[in-house]
Amino acid sequence: MNIKFLWVLCLSLAFLGNAWAEEEEVGEEEVAQSVAQYYNLAPAFVANFGSGETKKLKFVKAEISVRSSSSDSINEVMNHDALVRHQIVMLLSRQSEDVLSNPAGQEAIRLEALSLVQAALKTETGREQITDLFFTSFVVQR
């Protein structure tokens, strides 16, 4: 009687051990999916800005990276690179020198760029795809 009980107990533990291992593997896959991934939008963005009243051209150059939580989203950003770049160049082009020249203005541009890119990607793919957008370099030539 004790031997049968031990066999049943051993078999039960063996099955439970396999179930826990499968559950752990699924958990590791979910963690891998939620790790932040970054993608550099290369080459750097260069745009002229300001009013056409002065004859001197003014330029802004920005290097930009985006953050996402999955490699599939990064692939979608790469697939729609031209659309993403267009949104950002048009945004930079319509800025004033005052906005581009101070940190608060640059942060406002960053947030607006994030919103524009998310909206464009949502229209094309059904999802916003990116969680954040960063200026990794920002140069204004007056």
Image: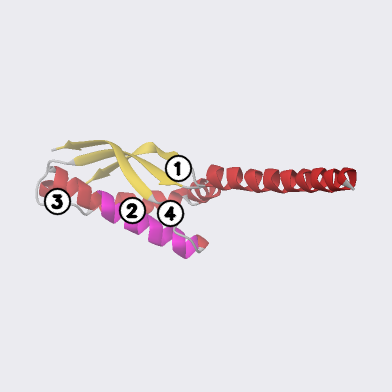
- Which residue is tagged 3? 96
Cα separation between marks 2 and 1: 16 Å
Nearer-N-terminus badge (2/3): 3
Mark 2, other Cα within 10 Å: few <14 / some 14–19 / many ≥20: many
- What residue is drawn where x is 36% and y is 49%? 132
- Which residue is tagged 1? 36
- What residue is drawn where x is 42% and y is 51%? 130
Q: Position of residue 63 (x, y in %)?
A: 32, 37
- 71 horizontally vs 36: left or right: right
Q: Which mark is residue 114?
A: 2
Q: Residue extending furthest front?
A: 1
Mark 2 residue type: Leu
Q: Is residue 92 visible?
A: no
- Which numbered disc, 2 or 1, marks the residue closer to the eye? 1
Under tag 1, what secondary structure? loop
- What residue is drawn where x is 72% and y is 43%? 17
Any magenta on residue 89? no
- 131 horizontally vs 89: left or right: right
- Which numbered disc, 2 or 3, marks the residue closer to the eye? 2
The colouring scheme, among rainbow, by chain, secondary structure or one colour, is: secondary structure
Nearer-N-terminus badge (3/4): 4
Cα separation between marks 3 and 4: 23 Å
Under tag 3, what secondary structure? loop
Cα separation between marks 2 and 3: 19 Å
| Quarter occupied by the C terminus | top left
Q: Position of residue 95 (x, y in %)?
A: 19, 52
